[in-house]
């Protein structure tokens, strides 16, 4: 078992805007929010792909804890 600690996880917000054009009004078609980034989380993802057990711990607070 490998334990990783991520003290500052990242929040990735990805939006899809079809037919994006500069200096034009653009509308978001889809939005995804993922809380799965940061060095410790990335290491654990690779460790799992390599077949080992892993546990990720970390902190998230403030308005981000509601995501």
Image (cartoon, rainbow, N blue to C red):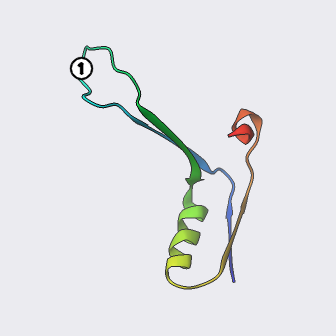
**x and y, in percent, of residue 42 in the image:** 53, 64
Residue drawn at the location 59% of the way across and 62% of the way down: 41
In the depicted view, which residue is nearer to us: 48 or 40? 48
Give the left or right position of residue 26, taking residue 14 as reference. Answer: left
Q: Residue at x 58, y 71 (%)?
A: 44
Residue displayed at 48% across by 36% down: 31
Q: Is residue 9 above or below residue 52?
A: above
Residue at the spot of label 1: 22
Q: Secondary structure at mark 1?
A: loop
Q: Please state the horizontal and vertical placement of residue 13, each as a whole percent of the image.
A: 50, 39
Q: Report the side of 28 relative to 32 (left or right).
A: left
Q: Residue at x 65, y 50 (%)?
A: 8
Q: Which image quarter: residue 62?
A: top right
Q: What x and y, as percent, mark residue 25?
A: 32, 14
Q: Nearer the viewer, residue 26 or 62?
A: 26
Q: Quadrant of residue 6?
A: bottom right
Looking at the image, residue 23 lies above or below residue 3: above
Image quadrant holding the N terminus, namely: bottom right
Quadrant location of the C terminus in the rendered image: top right
Above or below, comparing residue 21 to residue 66 in the picture: above
Horizontal arrangement in the rendering, residue 7 relative to residue 19 (left or right) = right
Label 1 crowd bin: few (<14), some (14–19), many (20+), radius 10 Å: few
> Which residue is more in the foreground, 36 or 43?
36
């Amino acid at each position: 078992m490998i334990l990783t600690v991520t003290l500052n996880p990242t929040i990735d917000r990805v939006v899809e805007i079809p037919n994006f054009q500069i200096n034009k009004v653009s509308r978001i078609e889809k939005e995804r929010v993922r809380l799965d980034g940061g060095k410790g989380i990335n290491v654990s993802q690779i460790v799992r792909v390599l077949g080992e057990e892993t546990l990720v711990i970390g902190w998230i607070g403030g308005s981000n804890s509601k995501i």
